[in-house]
Amino acid sequence: MRIALLVYDGMTALDAVGPYDSLSRLPEADIVTVSPDGGPVTCGGGIVIQAAASLDNVDRADVLIVPGGMPSALRGLLGDAAVMEWLRRIDQTSRYTCSVCTGALLLASAGVLRNRAAATHWRAHDALAALGATPVADRVHVDGKYLTSGGVSAGIDMGLVLCGLLVGRELGEAIELSMHYAPQPPFGTGNPATALTPARRQLIEERLRN
């Protein structure tokens, strides 16, 4: 089972590594990291990931995963005709097409999420709607063969949901246990709907912008 994981300069490392970890535990999983030119990429936080292939080297995959990234990185890819064409080409024959966080913007820009409901980072809902998809607040949303997740850490959940779809609930549960995945966030402000107060949420947003 070939899994193509797009990587690019400025992407959020956990968006890629989160689902990678769970999917790498699947039997017979062949995960190929794909960058536009096949070279190494530097994530938004400075971590360097060496790609295994370029867009030209991968013409099909059973699963496509597109992580999100920094706004400047996304703007560059949204205008990259080669990347958009590659996403459309892989999606044509994929069993599942998936995104993490703002990776949904790339899929939507390529046209594969048009008129579909999709999850993304809560700050990107308006941008996703402008690209023809319908944003939802789900942590993981499944619409046919399309799996999309909310921001960053939700990619771990998406990876586990995908494991269950690919190999069944029993093995999916075993993978979740092997990862010791039982999150207990210390502050409880990870979802804007449950953030402490409107004032506190505004403060958090201001700090994120600075």
Image (cartoon, helix red, strand yellow):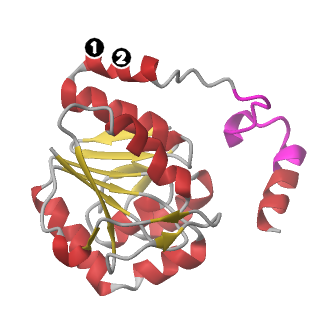
Q: Is residue 176 magenta?
A: no
Say whether residue 65 is left or right of residue 86: right
Q: Quadrant of residue 198?
A: top right
Q: Tell me if mark 2 has few (under 14), some (14-19) or many (20+) residues whose alpha carbon lies within 10 angstroms of its own.
A: few
Per the image, the residue denoted by label 1 is: 170
Q: Amino acid at mark 1?
A: Glu
Does residue 7 appear to the left or right of 75 in the view shown?
A: left
Vertical relation: 18 (above or below) 164:
below
- Secondary structure state at the residue bearing disc 2: helix
Q: Is residue 190 above or below residue 94?
A: above
Residue 26, x across and y down, in percent: 26, 32
Residue 82: % across, % down: 27, 83
Name the quarter where the C terminus is drawn: bottom right
Residue 159 at x, y percent in the picture? 38, 38
- Mark 2 touching mark 1, by CB under 8 A? yes
Residue under the point 44% across and 71% down? 8
For this rendering, which residue is in front, 73 or 198? 73
Q: Is residue 152 left or right of residue 112?
A: right
Distance in Å between CA atoms under marks 2 and 1: 6 Å
Identify the image quadrant of the N terminus: top left
How many discs mark residues in the rendered view? 2
Q: Residues within 10 Å of mark 1 (few under 14, many from 20)?
A: few
What's the residue at 25%, 63% (across, down)?
A: 112
Disc 2 residue type (three-letter) = Ala
Q: Which residues are magenta?
A: 185-201
Tell me the SS state at disc 1.
helix
Name the residue that disc number 2 marks.
174
Say above or below: 184 vs 73. above
Please identify the quarter of the rendering in which residue 114 is found: bottom left
What residue lies at 48% left-to-right and 25% top-to-bottom? Answer: 179
